[in-house]
Image: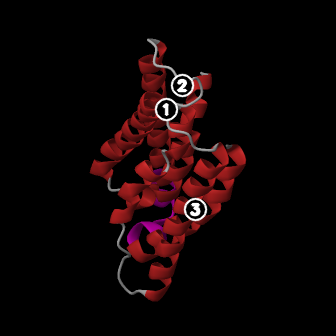
Amino acid sequence: MSFLLLGIDSLIACFAVGALVGRRSRLPYAALFGVCDAGAFLLGTALHWTMPEATAQVVSTAALVGLGLYLVVVAIGAQKVADTRWVWALPALLTLDNIGFGLIDHSWSTAVPVEAAEQALSSILLAAVGLAASAAVVRAIPQVHRNRVLTAGIAGAAMVVAGPLLLALD
């Protein structure tokens, strides 16, 4: 079960933005986290890229916080819902740590596809849990459920809070 820790960033990010992802889009969104994480791991392993872990963590955190601030500012200043299409870029933005994880041994072996599959499965499962938990919270608070601007603002604030949390966990 320790392989689930590989997708903890997916859990936190999906809990933060889950209210912005429609019911029919939840499974594809969770799958996108898995595909991006596994792909980044394979890319890092195959190309032997070097990236300091601290750099990957800071860039991923900055992307999460930046998108969160965007949502908060637009929700505060707008009467209509913020453009939430940017949440679909989040899985790709959070893959930098996985590229670095693929660099650990700098070799391609038969274990690499297994590790990539574990990362994908971990990210998909934890992203789905985060999306489900976020949806449950939104359903429990009817005012948030009915007001997309408020939902976008709360999701943005959750992303701003999630950024340092992810940094602390990595």
- Mark 1 vs 2, N-terminal side: 1
Q: What's under tag 2, amino acid-wise?
A: His
Name which residue lies at 27% across and 49% down.
Answer: 24
Is 86 placed left or right of 66 in the picture?
A: left
According to the picture, the residue beneath numbered tag 3 turns out to be: 62
Q: Relative to 64, is 89 on the left or the right? A: left
Of the pair 129 and 120, the residue shown nearer to us: 120
Q: Is residue 142 above or below residue 130?
A: below
- Quadrant (top left/top right/bottom left/bottom right) for the C terminus: top right
Q: CA distance from mark 1 to mark 2?
A: 6 Å
Answer few, some or many: residues within 10 Å of disc 3's Cα (few below 14, many 20 plus, some between 14 and 19).
some
Distance of mark 2 from mark 3, alpha carbons? Answer: 27 Å
* Residue under the point 35% across and 72% down: 83
Percent coordinates x, y for residue 16 in the rendering? 52, 57
Q: Which residue is mark 2?
A: 106
Q: Earlier in the sequence, mark 3 or mark 1?
A: 1
Q: Which residue is mark 1?
A: 48
The residue at 42%/24% (across/down) is 117
Secondary structure mostly seen in the magenta stretch? helix
* Quadrant of the image occupied by residue 152: bottom left
Residue 103, x across and y down, in percent:
55, 31
Q: Which residues are magenta?
A: 135-146
Q: Residue furthest left?
A: 24
Instruction: Report x, y in % for residue 25.
Output: 30, 50
Residue 142 is tagged as none
> Looking at the image, is mark 3 or mark 1 nearer the viewer?
1
Mark 1: which amino acid?
His
- The reply to whether discs 3 and 1 touch (Cβ–Cβ < 8 Å) is no
User: Circles 1 and 2: CB distance less than 8 Å?
Assistant: yes
